[in-house]
Image (cartoon, rainbow, N blue to C red):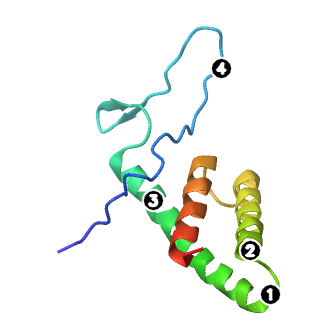
Amino acid sequence: MTIMKQVPDDFPRDTNLSSVSGVQPKLPVRLVEGRYIVGLTEGELLLRYEYCDDLVQQLVAYCQRKADEHPEWSHEITLERMAKGVALKGESGEWDITENEQQWMVSQIKLLLGW
């Protein structure tokens, strides 16, 4: 029996992963299994959540390590530095994460660390 994770309600679902140029209004749709889909399928959303959740777990350990290495840093400074690094990875395309997903990740890290 396979146990599937469920995407939490607070995970961003408004990931706009496409753009369409032109003057007239357009709606980016994709043909998936014979149906036209706007946005992500449930499976794609689950993959994005699992990707972000994995990064969150790694970044929690990273923040804890940095806090131990730099006791002079406040929790806010540690989180701010980590958030800037996440934003740079997202902007560069090294990590496939949207701005909303980045914000969600930072809030989850704060929650898990109790900071």
Q: Nearer the viewer, residue 43 or 63?
A: 63
User: Distance from label 1 to label 3 (Cα)?
Assistant: 31 Å
Q: Earlier in the sequence, mark 3 or mark 2?
A: 3
Callout 3–callout 2 Cβ contact below 8 Å:
no
**Residue 4 position (above or below residue 69):** above
Q: Earlier in the sequence, mark 2 or mark 4?
A: 4
User: Distance from label 3 to label 2 (Cα)?
Assistant: 24 Å
- Image quadrant of residue 19? top right
User: Distance from label 2 to label 1 (Cα)?
Assistant: 9 Å
Residue drawn at x 70%, y 75% as measured from the top left: 75
Residue drawn at x 80%, y 87% as measured from the top left: 70
Q: Nearer the viewer, mark 2 or mark 4?
A: 2
Callout 1–callout 3 Cβ contact below 8 Å:
no
Query: Could you say whether the residue bearing mark 3 is in a helix, strand or loop?
Result: helix
Q: Nearer the viewer, mark 3 or mark 2?
A: 2
Q: What residue is disc 4 on?
A: 21
Q: Nearer the viewer, residue 100 or 44?
A: 100
Residue 67 position, x and y percent, is: 72, 85
Q: Nearer the viewer, mark 4 or mark 1?
A: 1
Q: Nearer the viewer, residue 98 or 40?
A: 98
- Image quadrant of residue 47? bottom left
Q: Earlier in the sequence, mark 1 or mark 3?
A: 3
User: Distance from label 4 to label 1 (Cα)?
Assistant: 48 Å
- Give the amino acid type for the residue marked by disc 3 in the picture: Tyr
